[in-house]
Amino acid sequence: MSLHILLFIGSQEIIIIAVIILLLFGGRKIPELMRGLGSGIKEFKAAAKEDDKEKSSIESNTDKDTKE
């Protein structure tokens, strides 16, 4: 349901949200918040890649076991 709502957010709403965030956190805190968000996304992607490698490794081991 929340994705459905996000599809209908227009440019005006995004600008209003950005202004509210700017007023709440101030100009100095926003770069720190974005750095934290970026590092969180980077960690999430690394964990997802590691999980995919682990999954493919398990699948390849399972394939070898079934062939024997």
Image (cartoon, helix red, strand yellow):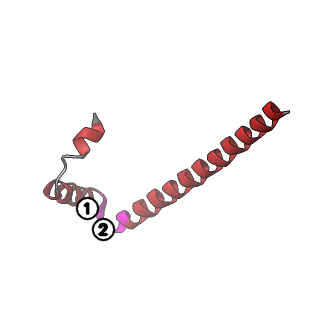
How busy is the neighbourhood of tag 1: few (under 14 within 10 Å), some, or many (20 plus)?
some
Q: Is residue 51 left or right of residue 44?
A: right
The kind of residue on which mark 2 rests is Gly
State the image coordinates of residue 46 (x, y, percent, origin top left). 59, 54
Q: Is residue 20 left or right of residue 53?
A: left
Decide whether residue 11 is among the magenta residues: no
Part of the protein shown in magenta:
25-30
Decide whether residue 26 is among the magenta residues: yes
How busy is the neighbourhood of tag 2: few (under 14 within 10 Å), some, or many (20 plus)?
few
Residue 26 appears in which quarter of the rendering? bottom left
State the image coordinates of residue 12 (x, y, percent, origin top left). 13, 57
Disc 1 vs disc 2: Cβ atoms closer than 8 Å? Answer: yes
The kind of residue on which mark 1 rests is Leu
Q: Is residue 55 left or right of residue 23?
A: right
Position of the N terminus, as image quadrant, is top left
Question: Label 1's element?
Answer: helix
The image's mark for residue 22 is 1
Identify which residue is drawn at 39% across, 67% down.
31
Question: Label 2's element?
Answer: helix
Identify which residue is drawn at 25% across, 39% down.
4
* Of pointers 1 and 2, the one earlier in the residue sequence: 1
State the image coordinates of residue 23 (x, y, percent, origin top left). 23, 59
Identify which residue is drawn at 41% across, 60% down.
33
Q: CA distance from mark 1 to mark 2?
A: 6 Å
Position of the C terminus, as image quadrant, is top right
Q: Is residue 40 left or right of residue 53?
A: left
The relative height of residue 52 versus residue 35 in the rendered view (above or below) is above
The image's mark for residue 50 is none
Query: In this figure, which residue is indicated by the disc labeled 2?
Result: 27
